Amino acid sequence: MNLHEYQAKALLKRFQVPVQEGIPADNSEAAVDAFKKLRMETGTKWAVIKAQIHAGGRGKGRIAGTEQRGVAIAKNAEEVKTIAGNLIGGTLVTVQTGVSGKKVNKVLVAQDVYYPGPSPVKEFYLSILLDRSRGQHVLIYSTEGGMDIEEVASHNPERIFREWVYPGSALKPFQARKIAFNLGLQGEANRHMVKFVISLYDAYSSLDCALIEINPLFKTADDRILAVDCKMRLDDNALFRHPDLADLRDITEEDPAEVEAGKYNLNFVKLDGNVGCMVNGAGLAMATMDMIKLSGGEPATFLDVGGTANAQTVEAGFRIILKDPKVKAILINIFGGIVRCDRVAQGVIDAYRSIGDIRIPIIVRLQGTNAEAAKELIEKSGLKVQSAILLSEAAALVNQAVA
């Protein structure tokens, strides 16, 4: 589950991680009020107005049809109102959103931290995530933070450092000191960085995060270390331990089809192909998608109905798949172990009749418990549903459908 920047920063503050202070606003008047309050509390003269969407590249992105960038400096209340008004309700297009962009429903009015002082300011990069190849959490960091970190990783990989931590173990002080040293920090800045990194890893571990990315990780002119931006992704499988965090979910930022699938406990991923795929079991789904490709098609969905498929979940799956105009055929591939094939077949028939006129081919391959009875049910239903028992039969029918 992805969080907005303002939500992520609020969670970091629970763990004493210093952040750039800010206040979210959902209209231009609220943004002006946030600026005035922020100026009183922090003494900031200017404000940074940041569009709140689940995508990176906001600083270089623009509101569709305008020159308004997703992150902008406002020097007074009038500029705050203008920039917030340009952002809220607009569609922000970045390198990560694609040409369709994302609608901006909120902005974060944040303090200016780039003021001059006794030492130069500096931007770093730091992220924490799971390195699956090693089975360890890894801190990835660089002296080159900011908007062009991808270019650094591509052209100057020697400037990217890594520090691994075993799951269940805290980040050791010597590791935090090593990170501060590799970032070239000394004195107060070094000590603040050590404390920052230890607190950040504590937040990552305690919140069951899948990812925390701080870019830029900022050294102020008076040698404080702050999270100026924060991208945070929570592990959905651990949300049962954090019921309060589940309330932070913003479904307006998610694919509507995935949101609908979640209501029926369907595991759904939208793909770019032309054959809708409905199965029970992740392994069977992978094999089915391979079969679709070998048959000349391209998978349009990964939709796993699980081991308790019934008429309701099958109908929901149908409706989700049919919303994609690129789908030319639907392949239902069910192995009847826990679930009986005849029950799934009846679910397909009921769903077909409930939805009405379905104009694309539907291929149903049922194997396992009561597979023969299931095939007979489908064939006697009188509906335009093609049944198969062997995978090769299903493959041939898919090939005909997309040819």
Image (spheres, rainbow, N blue to C red):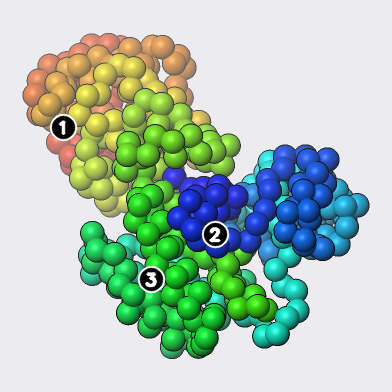
Tag 1 residue: 335
The amino acid at mark 1 is Phe
Q: Tell which of 223 and 66 is nearer to you.
A: 223
- The residue wearing badge 2 is 230
* As drawn, 56 above or below 234: below
Q: How many marks?
A: 3
Point out the tag, 1 or 2, that comes first from the N-terminus: 2
Could you say where residue 309 lies in the image, as x and y percent from the top left? 25, 23
> Which of the 4 image quadrants contains residue 331?
top left
User: Which residue is located at x 44 percent, y 22 percent?
Assistant: 358
Q: How far apart are the two marked residues, 3 and 2, measured between alpha carbons?
A: 15 Å
Mark 1 or mark 3, which has the lower sequence index? 3
Amino acid type, callout 3: Leu
Q: Considering only vertical position in the picture, is 269 above or below 225?
A: above
Residue receiving disc 3: 139
3D distance between C-alphas at marks 1 and 3:
42 Å
